[in-house]
């Protein structure tokens, strides 16, 4: 219950700040970016962090959601049209996740990463050459429906659903695949089924993130969804900690803030970004959170208290 | 027919570049199981060093080539020493992220110093500018030199890997790092040596591309890097002859597809081949299937 | 009717037959030992039975409640769901998960709630998870592991890791249990204790057990029948006394004293 009160407070405070113009348009865009990155990161974390399937193709799933939603809302610029766009975007991305999931399931580790990378590049090239996506020029003037309320609903909703999922029997089945695939299948876990499920859920969420992107920034081009976008998401996931949803959220917020701050130094922005990345990886290769969860009151539902106790006792022990 | 032959000539040229880069990927992967994303940027640095030597120092091709290879060697060894070695025992995904970080650092660091705009290699003159006509096929001197140097370097590499102590150490470490260490092989210096070899080849590829295509820019490594990596996977990653075959195959496919009107989908075809080979035979053309011990 | 019948099963790796033409029958409720020198193909046979490898030829059938279930070509998880569970020689626990989580995962097939319940934590979630928790703790008590349920599996002492592997296999609710060297690395006192517990588990869960073991005391003491493998072939079978005096078995173990090994 505390969780919902805290979430309600967060929503209300930001909403008031926006209505009283204390949050500038620029910072609102940062908020949207944070929300999108959180959705992308937690959904990739389900695939890579929890199920252990190394994917470098998240931008591909995102782009499908973005284009489908854009195309639908440009033809039906109404709230129902927008909702339809988001749903269809998620469904299209999920279907793609299924199609990618199936044949690549035999692959492990780096090979899977490269195959998913290839898949997302193929999608990008297809969007570059399709008429309905207006090729390299992209789509302009997508109706803007995303505001703080929608963003909040989607982001919090997806995070809560996924955190419930990973704590269920189905989530445990996914985790067992990451830990030891052969042991998992010998214990009755249908590993193929759960890998596909992880890909489908992860892809659907990425599709929603894409839809939010399209509907807020009202401009799409295929090159927004290149290899670097997938890398961005993977960086958030690894930085936050594989298998830690709160870590993903923390890293998404942190990186968005760093990135916003670095906007003032455009020439060395990427240089500093890459240096920060290298330094964090060298000194904290397991990411900020490892596989632990934070147990703040806001995230109390997310945090597994036993894990947190273990964390504290480990800290005390050393 | 002429068109086909011409495409084959062009394919061999492009394939040589991919093969040179792919060798670095495959050797590094073979020895520390890392997709070294920064490798393609070492190739880019090689192109810039060559540009610098030829434009400002007015050096000839051979000294420029050697300098570029030397600089890239040092760079490659430094990268391994500073960024990868501390993570030798960390999760592989962390090392991969580090490699991506190094890659971005090299790209945007270079961009910071030389700016993002395209640079043009000095116009080739004299013997280098010659073109030969065999029937209706045009072969330029640059192509001959590019392919010639590639084959020379690959032969040299084969000699080093097969016949020298360090090459044997490399092969031993890539088979079983712990066993090699127990046999008294210095793993760290062997890994450094591998990076040195791969980076030298990438540096050579960089300057050769500069001469052949004339234009270079800080992000020039990204796409060829991906394709060279695909070439390495195609041939069987970790296998040196596999990378060579893969390089020429991918080069040929790419030239054929764009030569026959599919240039929009050129990259898509290459990625499609990648996915096909991964599904049909993930261990690559020359790779052996390995089974996990239960 | 035997609960497990293996007929002329062969598996070769790169031309080398790891298991060749092996036939064996295990009756319901039996405790059967599988012995043989290193590299005789014992673990490979387990991997064939559990679907990790697919036999080149031959058939494997499981009979549960007088129903004949061919296992050939089934994937490991469905073989497990049919009632055949195993432990691993080289311990394959989920090392970075807790003891309890290891058992919960193995109970996977008892879960009736669907994906929607997982996402929304509907009432069925709480009800079933609580039941699962109780059942898991019940199982963990067998080896006194309930007190350690929140420890990471990797932090357990070696012997307890082997115990947890057995509990995890039991959690899948098997009819036939395959144990791959359950006593490996244990001292004689621990082995004696393990023998008691294996006997007790068999009674309590109404199990049929096939076990691979190098510890001859254990095999000879608790197994009712023994199959001996050498070079992938069954060279002898029978009661412990018959096997002990079998000439071919003695030859295969030449250099090792089978009575004392």
Image (spheres, rainbow, N blue to C red):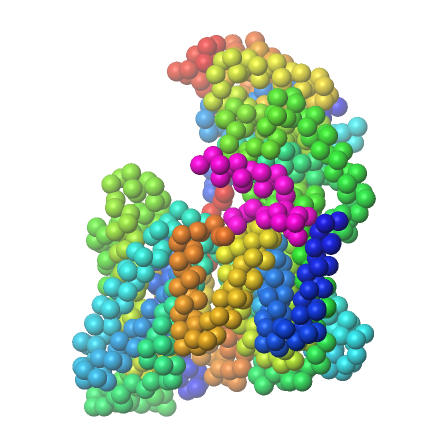
Q: Is residue A203 above or below residue A269?
A: above
Judge whether residue A294 is colored magenta. Answer: yes
- Write the residue at 70% across / 39% down: C108
Which image quadrant: the N terminus of chain B? bottom left
Q: Where is residue C157 in the image (x, y as percent from the top left)?
A: 50, 26
Q: Is residue A213 above or below residue C244?
A: below
In the image, taking residue B159 as reference, residue A199 lies left or right, namely right
Residue A157: name its quadrant.
bottom right
Residue range highlighted in magenta? A289-318
Of residue A93 and residue A281, the one placed in the foreground of this image is A281
Q: Is residue B98 above or below residue B178?
A: below
- Write the residue at 42% across / 48% down: B90
Q: Where is residue A190 in the image (x, y as percent from the top left)?
A: 67, 45
Of residue B218 and residue A243, the one placed in the foreground of this image is A243
In the image, taking residue B106 as reference, residue C211 lies left or right, namely right
Q: In this view, does B181 lie above or below B289?
A: above
Q: Where is residue B104 in the image (x, y as percent from the top left)?
A: 41, 68
């Amino acid at each position: 219950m505390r969780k919902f009160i805290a979430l309600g407070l967060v929503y209300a405070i930001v909403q008031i700040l926006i209505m009283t113009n204390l949050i500038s348009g620029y910072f609102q865009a940062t908020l949207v970016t944070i929300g999108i990155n959180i959705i992308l990161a937690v959904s990739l974390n389900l695939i890579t962090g929890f199920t252990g399937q190394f994917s470098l193709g998240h931008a591909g799933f995102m782009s499908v959601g973005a284009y489908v939603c854009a195309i639908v809302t440009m033809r039906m610029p109404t709230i129902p049209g927008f909702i339809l766009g988001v749903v269809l975007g998620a469904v299209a991305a999920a279907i793609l996740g299924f199609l990618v999931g199936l044949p690549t399931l035999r692959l492990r580790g780096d090979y899977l990463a490269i195959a998913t990378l290839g898949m997302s590049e193929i999608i990008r090239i297809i969007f570059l050459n399709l008429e309905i996506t207006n090729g390299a020029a992209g789509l302009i003037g997508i109706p803007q429906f995303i505001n703080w309320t929608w963003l909040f609903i989607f982001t919090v909703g997806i995070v809560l659903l996924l955190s419930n999922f990973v704590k269920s029997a189905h989530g445990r089945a996914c985790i067992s695949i990451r830990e030891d695939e052969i042991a998992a299948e010998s214990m009755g876990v249908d590993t193929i089924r759960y890998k596909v499920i992880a890909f489908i859920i992860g892809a659907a969420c990425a599709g929603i993130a894409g839809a939010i992107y399209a509907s807020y920034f009202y401009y799409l081009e295929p090159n927004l969804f290149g290899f670097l976008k997938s890398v961005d998401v993977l960086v958030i996931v690894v930085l936050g900690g594989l298998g830690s949803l709160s870590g993903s959220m923390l890293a998404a917020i942190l990186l968005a803030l760093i990135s916003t701050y670095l906007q003032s130094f455009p020439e060395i922005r990427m240089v500093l970004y890459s240096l920060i990345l290298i330094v964090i990886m060298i000194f904290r290769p397991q990411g900020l959170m490892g596989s632990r969860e934070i147990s703040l009151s806001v995230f109390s539902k997310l945090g597994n208290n036993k894990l947190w106790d273990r964390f504290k006792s480990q800290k005390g022990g050393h | 027919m002429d068109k086909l032959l011409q495409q084959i000539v062009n394919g061999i040229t492009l394939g040589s570049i991919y093969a040179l880069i792919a060798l670095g990927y495959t050797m590094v992967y073979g020895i520390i199981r890392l997709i070294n994303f920064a490798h393609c940027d070492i190739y880019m640095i090689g192109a810039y060093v060559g540009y610098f030597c030829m434009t400002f120092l007015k050096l000839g091709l051979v000294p420029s080539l050697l300098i570029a290879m030397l600089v890239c060697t040092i760079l490659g060894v430094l990268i391994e020493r500073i960024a990868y070695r501390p993570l030798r025992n960390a999760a592989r995904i962390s090392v991969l992220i580090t490699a991506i970080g190094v890659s971005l650092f090299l790209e945007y660091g270079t961009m910071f110093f030389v700016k993002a705009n395209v640079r043009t290699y000095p116009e080739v003159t004299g013997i280098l500018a010659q073109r030969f006509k065999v029937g209706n096929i045009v072969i330029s001197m640059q192509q001959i030199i590019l392919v010639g140097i590639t084959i020379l370097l690959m032969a040299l590499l084969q000699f080093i890997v097969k016949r020298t102590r360090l090459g044997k150490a490399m092969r031993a470490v890539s088979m079983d790092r712990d066993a090699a260490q127990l046999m008294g092989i210095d793993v760290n210096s062997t890994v450094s040596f591998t990076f040195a070899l791969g980076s030298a080849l990438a540096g050579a590829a960089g300057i050769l591309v500069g001469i052949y295509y004339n234009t270079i820019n800080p992000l020039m490594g990204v796409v060829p890097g991906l394709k060279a990596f695909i070439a390495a996977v195609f041939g069987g990653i970790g296998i040196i002859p596999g990378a060579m075959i893969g390089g020429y195959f991918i080069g040929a496919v790419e030239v054929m597809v764009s030569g026959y009107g599919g240039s929009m989908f050129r990259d898509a075809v290459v990625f499609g081949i990648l996915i096909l080979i991964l599904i049909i035979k993930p261990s690559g053309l020359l790779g052996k299937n390995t089974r996990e011990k239960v | 009717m035997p609960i497990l019948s293996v007929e002329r099963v062969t598996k070769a790796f790169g031309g080398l037959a790891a298991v060749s033409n092996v036939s064996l029958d295990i009756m319901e409720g039996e405790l059967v030992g599988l012995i043989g020198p290193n590299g005789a193909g014992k673990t490979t046979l387990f991997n064939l039975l559990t679907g990790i490898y697919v036999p080149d030829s031959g058939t494997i059938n499981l009979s549960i409640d007088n129903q004949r279930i061919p296992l050939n070509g089934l994937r490991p998880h469905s073989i497990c769901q049919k009632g055949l569970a195993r432990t691993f020689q080289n311990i394959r626990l989920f090392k970075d998960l807790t003891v309890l989580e290891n058992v919960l995962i193995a109970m996977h097939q008892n879960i009736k709630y669907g994906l929607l319940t997982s996402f929304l934590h509907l009432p069925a979630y709480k009800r079933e998870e609580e039941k699962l928790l109780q059942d898991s703790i019940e199982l963990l008590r067998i080896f006194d592991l309930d007190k350690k349920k929140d420890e990471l599996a990797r932090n357990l002492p070696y012997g307890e890791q082997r115990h947890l592997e057995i509990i995890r296999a039991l959690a899948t609710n098997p009819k036939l249990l395959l144990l791959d060297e359950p006593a490996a690395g244990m001292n004689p006192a621990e082995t004696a204790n393990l023998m008691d517990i294996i006997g007790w588990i068999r009674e309590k869960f109404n199990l049929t057990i096939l076990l691979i073991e190098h510890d001859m005391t254990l095999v000879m003491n608790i197994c009712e029948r023994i199959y001996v493998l050498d070079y992938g072939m069954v060279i002898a079978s029978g009661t412990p006394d018959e096997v002990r005096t079998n000439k071919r078995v003695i030859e295969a173990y030449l250099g090792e004293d089978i009575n004392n090994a």
